Amino acid sequence: MERIELEDRPIREASFQMLFPFSLTADCHGKMRESLLDEGFVPFRLDDMAQQDAYYGPNHRVSHRNMERYYLPFTNHVLFPHEHHPEGFQRMSKKLDLRAALHMRHFEAPFDIYSVDVVLCPFDTGFITLRVGLAKASPTLTEAIEFAERLRALQNAKDEDEAPWVACRGEAYAEVQDFIFKAIVPHTVQYLDRTPMDGAYFEKLPYLIDERMYVIAYYAFPEDARIGLTDRYRAARLDGMDEEGRPYISASHLPYIEQYCRDTGFDRWAPDTYYMTEESCFCCLTTLPEDQAARVANKMYGEYYYGLLLNLFHRIVLLKLSNAYSRVRLERTPAQTEVLIRAITTFSAKYDFLEVVSQSQGREIFVQIRRMYGNDELFEDVKMTLTDLYKYQENATSKRSSYLLTVLTIYTVISGIYGMNQVIDDLEGPIRWGNMGGYSFFQWLALIVILSGLIVAFLLTGNILWKWGRDLVKRLRGYSGSIR
């Protein structure tokens, strides 16, 4: 087999944002938000300029003014709502400035935890974002990638002698998920929806797609370095170390690597800066001078962070809608069908934006991420689902109307022919109960039909009023797209 020689390059800086998507229990946004406020989280607001350099480490800041101009206005009201609103992204941030260490088989990696975000989104979804920077002296690209690959694994899938563990504030955490949900965001697990985990053997948390976090990585190389093809491939694939602790690459065919980098890379600013998009990683590699590289890193914390967040939200909601349709198709309950139609229509109208970014380079990166996740194909499938649901609802409504018309016709005929001629006189004024003892079979039939018809009419009226009131409450509250 052809072997590719790898050069382990030193880097100036390695910083990461780890995104963990989760599913929330229904109607718990308010309670979870209050819990986060009690833990010291602060609502993120674009007009709060003090937050521009509060969460991104000592050398980075995000310009709120530039970030607002970067996205189109109809996107801003979803990404940056002015107030607590269930139809927007409710970002809650907390500055931490903690030092921790990830102990791995081949080396120990100290890292700084700058801040943590909890983003509450519509459709009962959310994200936890952990911002960290590798604090190891003179790290190499291999060590940085290995650190990211190990830290993003919430549960240990390795043997005990290879399983990493985290040390922070004198405490040891056997798994990364224990570290996050005990040391970083305690009291959060109670709000997570565990329904998808029914029947699971090993998983402990309700992951929506994978048991690993998504990685936004930034690697700054020395100015005189050259970013090679294998460097880009390994950074995107998160290929760190092999079992012997040597640099590892998961491919050996150079034309394949070249084709992969062409398909997943964005090289508009090559050879100084490259962006790579993968299903589990979005990374930037740059050799720009420190002042210019800092501006690139700031975009990774700001504009590009929200671009990835929005694409992940689209993908997760589309998968949830597809999963909900599979259940509705089996059960075929009118209430579930109506909820799913409303959810798909709401997502299509309010959240599935094709034109999101106002700047050309940002639009290209956003489209690249969207294409990598296959969101367009997923959305086309969901639109076909909506068409099928409308057809089913139309047929079901037609059948129910036909049945109801048949029943009402029977009631009208029997009540009109028999009731008006045989029973109605005894029901006028004071009811003559004594006359009923001598009723014939047809008179009793007419009386029963009249009384049951009144009951049916009252029940139908009550049902219509209940549905009308339920829809009115939904409109007043604002539909946030709760699906199960």
Image (tube, helix red, strand yellow):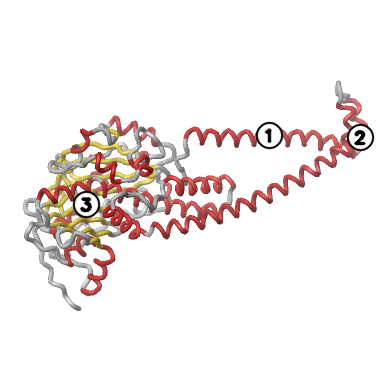
Residue 394's place in the image compared with 252, above or below, is above
| Amino acid under disc 1 | Thr
For residue 162, side relative to residue 356 (left or right): left
Instruction: Between residue 67 and residue 233, name the one nearer to us.
Output: 67
The residue under the point 13% across, 43% down is 59
Q: Residue at x 14, y 42 (%)?
A: 99
In this rendering, position of residue 318 left or right of residue 341 = left
Instruction: Give the alpha-carbon distance from disc 1 to disc 3, as whole Å.
Output: 59 Å
Where residue 78 appears, as percent x and y from the top left, is: 37, 41
Quadrant in which the N terminus is drawn: bottom left
Of tags 2 and 3, the one toward the viewer is 2
Check disc 3 and give the amino acid type.
Answer: Leu
The answer for how far apart the CA atoms under marks 2 and 1 are is 27 Å
The answer to the question of whether label 2 and label 3 lie on touching residues, with beta carbons closer than 8 A, is no
Label 2 to label 3: alpha-carbon separation: 84 Å
How far from the left and from the top, in percent, is residue 379? 44, 56
Mark 2 or mark 3: name the one nearer the start of the chain. Answer: 3
Q: Which residue is mark 1?
A: 461
Please indicate, yes or no, whether residue 284 appears anywhere in the rendered image: yes
SS for callout 2: helix
Task: Work out whether mark 1 precedes mark 3 in sequence or the reverse, and give the earlier one.
Answer: 3
User: What residue does disc 3 label?
Assistant: 151
Dot 3 falls on a residue whose secondary structure is: helix
Q: Is residue 435 left or right of residue 400?
A: right
Q: Which residue is labeled 2 in the image?
A: 421
**Where in the figure is residue 318, as x and y percent of width and height?**
43, 53
Q: Which label sits on residue 108?
A: none
Q: Residue at x 51, y 48 (%)?
A: 340
